[in-house]
Amino acid sequence: MTPLAFQSEIEAFLTALRYEKNYSPRTLDAYSRDLFEFTSYLTRGLQDDSLKLEKIDHIGIREFLGWLYRKGNGKSSVARKLATLKSFFRFLHSEGRLAVNPARLVKSPKLPQKSPRTLSIQEVDSILDLPDASSAKGLRDRVMLEFLYASGLRVSELVGLDMQDLSLSQRLVRVSGKGRRQRLVPFGKRALSALEAYLPARLRILSRQGCRKDADALFLNLRGGRLGVRSVQKKLAEYVRLSALALNVHPHTFRHSFATHLLNNGADLRSVQELLGHKSLSTTQRYTHLTVNELIRTYRKSHPKARERE
C-alpha cells in the first residue's frame, strides 16, 4: 500500500476546503502534508491494502501523536497536525463515509499561553518615521508601515490590496482576509496623508514600466510588479535595524500593537474582533490580559493608596 492511502477521501476533503471554505493554497498545502505524514505512519511496513478507514480508532491517532513527539515535534506542531486530523475525520463522518469519528475522543495538547509581543506608541512612531519621503521607495514603505499599524492588517492582506479596495473620502479599506472573508477597516489621517503622497509616485512607476498584470496593485516594487510578503518582511527588518530598537519586530507585531492599543484606549472586544477579521472572539481575547496588566500598572501608579504597603 502506498503512503497515499485514502487518496480519494483526502482529495474530497481538500476540495471541500478549497471551494466551500475558501482556504488559501498555502493552508491546503499544510493540510495535505499533515495527512500525507499520517497515512505514511499508518501504512509503514504494510505490503497490501489491508488498512481500512473504519479500522482507524482514537488509540491509533494517539500513537501517531506519540510518534511525532518522539521525532522531536513540539506541542504546537503536534496540536496543529491533530487539528488537521480532527477536521479530516469530522468531514468524513459528516459526509457519511465513516460511521464514527475516531478523532473525537482525542484531546489536543495543552499549549502555554504566550503573550503577543507589542510595541509602545513611541516605538511604533520611531519606525514609521524612518522611510525617506524623497524617494518612491520611501513613500511606498511609509504607507506600507502606516497600514500595518493603522488598520492592523496581516502582511498577506496588505500585499493583496488593490486600488479599488480604497475609499480615500471615507478613509476605509476593503480587506480580503482568511477564507476570503471580506471586511471594511478604517485608517487614520496620518495614513491618508502618506497614501496621498505615494499615489503619484506609484503612477510614475507604472508609466516607466508600461502596462503590467499587477497594474491594480496598491503596493508595487520598483519594476512595477506587486510587492510580495517576503519583501515586506525584509524591508521592515531593515527599518527596525535603523531604528536601533533591540526588538524582534515582524509585520504581525504591528497587528498585535494595533489591537492592544485599541483595547487600552477603551475599544470593546467585539469591535476589535471585527477590525482584525477574527472568526472567533476567543482569538481576540488573548489581548485582554495585556490590557488588564496596563490597568494594574495605571492603578498602582495613580491611586493614592495603591503603594502604601509596597
Image: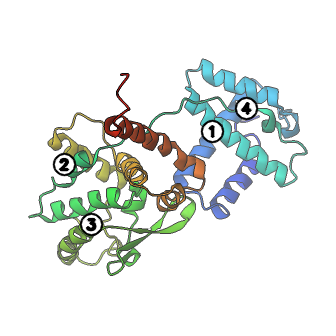
Split into 4 quadrants, where in the image is the N terminus? Answer: top right
Position above or below: 111 against 170: above
Q: Which amino acid type corresponds to the residue marked 4 in the rendered image?
A: Lys
Frontmost of labels 2 and 4 is 2
Q: Label 3: how many residues lie within 10 Å, few (<14), some (14-19) or many (20+)?
A: many
Mark sitting earlier along the chain (3/4): 4
Q: Toward the viewer: 254 or 135?
A: 254
Q: Which amino acid type corresponds to the residue marked 2 in the rendered image?
A: Ser
Determine the secondary structure under disc 2.
helix
Position above or below: 224 against 253: below
Q: Residue furthest right?
A: 99
Q: Residue furthest top?
A: 70
Evaluate if marks 3 and 1 touch, with contact meaning CB atoms under 8 Å apart.
no
The residue singled out by tag 2 in the image is 126
The residue singled out by tag 3 in the image is 191
The residue singled out by tag 1 in the image is 34
Q: Label 2: how many residues lie within 10 Å, few (<14), some (14-19) or many (20+)?
A: some
